[in-house]
Amino acid sequence: MENNFKNKNILITGGLGFLGSSLSHTLIGYGANITIIDNLNPLYGGNIFNIKEVSDRITIIINDVRNMEIMMPLVEMADIIFHLAAQVSYIDSLQIPYEDLDLNAKATLNILESCRKLNPKAKIIFSSSRMVYGKVDKLLVTENCSTNPLSLYGIHKLTSEKYLLMYNKDFGIPITILRLTNPYGPRQQIKHSKYSLVGWFIRQAIEGKVIKIFGDGSQLRDYMSMILLTQ
């Protein structure tokens, strides 16, 4: 694993958030050269504090992933791009549909076009979502299950997946798509309940509040610990 990243130029979009900052801590240990771009939108949990311990070894750019004047030279010099920047609430996506479209679909297309024109060998690793499935009628969900998203967030994430698959097929750009299911771990935003049930329960426990569960408590959800990323 370490040899895959040593001395590689890594670009992480949304790199000051929960996933990106945890990834940065690990990749620094592998000897990677890391550049982060993040617009520090307070809605999405980006925070300089998240990479405080390793900030002297990371190039940090406070800007928007949709700013192609900034993004194109970053894409051009990258060996691997972890595209994590996103509007991360399926609840909010209906209230801000164009913002969701821009961040969860158009930004991906812009990165792909930059790769096609400037750096087709750069590998893109994209954080998609379980929300691309919509409601499922099987207990075990695999990558081969049909997709039928029920939110704009899910639709736009699936759109990004289609862009990535097409550019891989037509232009040979290497890609990996990860459909993450409820990740949790250190540096996660816990200010409100929109993005993380685990984080919100922890926040309520810290504040000595009652942890409310709606329904009869028998609901099942898959959760994915990101603790390994910090070791």
Image (tube, rainbow, N blue to C red):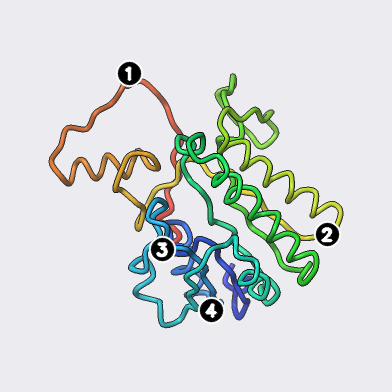
Give the image location of residue 130, x and y in percent.
56, 37
In space, the residues marked 2 and 1 are separated at their CA atoms by 47 Å
Q: Can you identify the residue that label 1 sits on? A: 215
N-terminal of the pair, mark 2 or mark 1, is 2
Q: Can you identify the residue that label 2 sits on? A: 172
Q: Is 64 left or right of 49, judged from the image as shown?
A: right
Give the image location of residue 175, x and y in percent.
71, 56
Q: Secondary structure at mark 3?
A: helix
What amino acid is at disc 1?
Gly
Q: Are marks 3 and 4 in contact (CB under 8 Å)?
A: no
Crowding at mark 1 (Cα within 10 Å: few <14, some 14-19, many 20+): few
Q: Secondary structure at mark 2?
A: loop
What amino acid is at disc 4?
Gly
In space, the residues marked 3 and 4 are separated at their CA atoms by 15 Å
Residue 96 vertical placement versus 211 (above, below): below
N-terminal of the pair, mark 2 or mark 3, is 2
What amino acid is at disc 3?
Thr
The N terminus, quarter of image: bottom right
Give the residue displayed 45% in from the left and 38% down from the top: 92
The furthest residue to the right: 170
Q: Are marks 2 and 3 in contact (CB under 8 Å)?
A: no
Give the residue displayed 49% in from the left and 37% down from the top: 90
Residue 131 picture quarter: top right
Give the image location of residue 151, x and y in percent.
56, 31
